[in-house]
Amino acid sequence: MTLRVRTLIASGIALVALVIMGIVVFVQFALTAAVGIALHQELSPTADATASLTLAQANASGALSDYIMLTREASLTQYRESIGRATTLLDQIQGALPADKPTLLALLKNSRATQQAWVATDAAQVIALMEGGKRQRAMRATNTKEAWASYDAMTLASSKLNQAVNDERDSAASALDDVNTVLGVSLLLVGICIVVGLLIFVFGLQRWVLAPLRHLRQDLQQAARVAGHETPIEEVGPPELQDVAIDAELLRRGLVREIDEARAAREGLAQDAPLVAAMEAELTARSDVTVPGLAVSGTSQSAVGVMAGDWWDPILRPDGSLAIVVADVSGHGPEASVTAIRVRSILRAGLQSGLAPDQVIAMAATSGAQDAHFVTGIVLIADPVAGTIQWANAGHHPAIVVTHDKESFLCEPTGPLISSLGGEWSTRTAPFGSGDVLVAFTDGLVESRNADGDELESSMVSQFIRGLDAPVRENPEELISRLLAQVRHRAADWRRDDVTLVAAARPR
């Protein structure tokens, strides 16, 4: 089963689970909303109305008593308004109660009947006596057992109606709580399903993707680090990763073939041309230089054979600073290498004695007054203690300095190239702070052309360096590897000239 199919299956299962969970949650929400609306629209207003009914009947009784005691017409008006409101409330309650509640309807009917009985037995009779001027008889009539019994029956019936409506509302609220409980359990189950699904997904991702990737990475690291690159890369995991492993294995085999061919060529060169081999060894020999606060790395690649006209040289100066020389002799082959070895030795000796960059370039030019070859070169001195960089540039491509905040400047030429024509050179100084990086190179890097015939410009190199993250910029070896890979990928004529590339950084 391919990784694509496995991903589609996992996505489909997740989609179905989400749809089911969504339907469950929606249905539960709908039920909850329906119960809540019914509770609000039917029971809550009815409960309020029954409570108001009891209060209105009590107000009517109190107003009637005031009318008898004080003979005030306002009390009579208040009685009539209260008993009228009670009657209106009874009508509202009857209209609000659903037809499927016979118990409530029976209590409502009883409440209406007892109110009418009290009005007929007590209120109407008392009002008639008061209007006839028989106040004493009215007082006796309102205090009879029959009058009190009818009033008690009315208030009891209203209280029972109110209690029954409240009980019904509490029952509906309890039903709502049950629905909420079901909803909570459903959500809990949904959450459990999500967690289980995530665990299954993580397990599948670990087993089908991450574990094979780790295995493939270990094989690649082993193949790259072990001398000879003989470690085979196994095919593991789903077909997609197996295809990657197959391609990597083919690449490894091709690399091993090229290494074997290069080794055979070097061995043949050492056997058949020992002088050339010795010159190449002399030109590439470098002392192990370490300067606190500086990290340096460089590489030289020959365009023709093993003899390159380019070189770079790190040199420790008496004051503890580091000098870096990058130079390029015109032409190729043994003659150019002889010139390179002589100029390299003069520059190294002068810098080790503490001379300034322009002075050592002048010495090299004087020594080559009869040379047929010319040399371009740049001498840089990085001083991490002073936080500066000095340079003298003899007609060479400008080195690029990128600061920690991704600003950049060029170490422009300060004099002509080194040749029999002589010349004058000067030394310039610029800040070189923590997090800054210096990149120097020969023309083989920037004169490579792409498929359209366009050369690589220094501005493009600077842009690439500034686009790297700080940890990569401050690691010269990684910076050089990435820059070379980018330029070689762009170039259509990579081996047209020797390439030397050096990077120095002040890691923070």
Image (cartoon, helix red, strand yellow):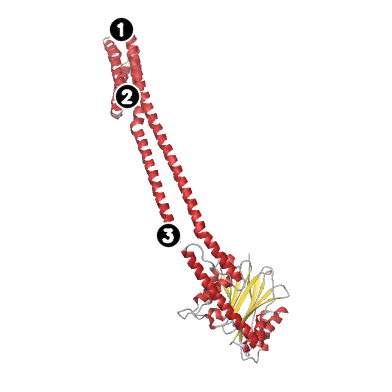
Which of the image's four quarters has the N terminus?
Answer: bottom left
Residue type at mark 2: give it. Thr
Q: Which residue is at the front of the view, 33 or 204?
A: 204
Real-space CA distance between mark 3 and mark 1, rounded to the nearest whole angstrom: 100 Å
- Name the quadrant containing residue 316: bottom right
Q: Residue 309: image x %, image y %?
A: 61, 84
Q: Do the residues labelled 2 and 3 touch (CB within 8 Å)?
A: no
43 left or right of 351 in image:
left
Q: Mark 2 points at which residue?
A: 103
Whichever of labels 2 and 3 marks the residue nearer the N terminus, that label is: 3
The image position of residue 312, as x and y in percent, is 63, 79
Look at label 3 and name its amino acid: Val
Please state if 365 lies on the left or on the right of 181 as rendered: right
Q: Name the residue under label 3.
A: 5
Mark 2 to mark 3 CA distance (whole Å) = 63 Å
Task: Of the two numbered discs 3 and 1 on the same chain, state the one appearing first in sequence.
Answer: 3
**Mark 1 highlights which residue?**
137
Visible residue check, residue 148 = yes
* Dot 2: element: helix
Closer to the eye: label 2 or 1: 2
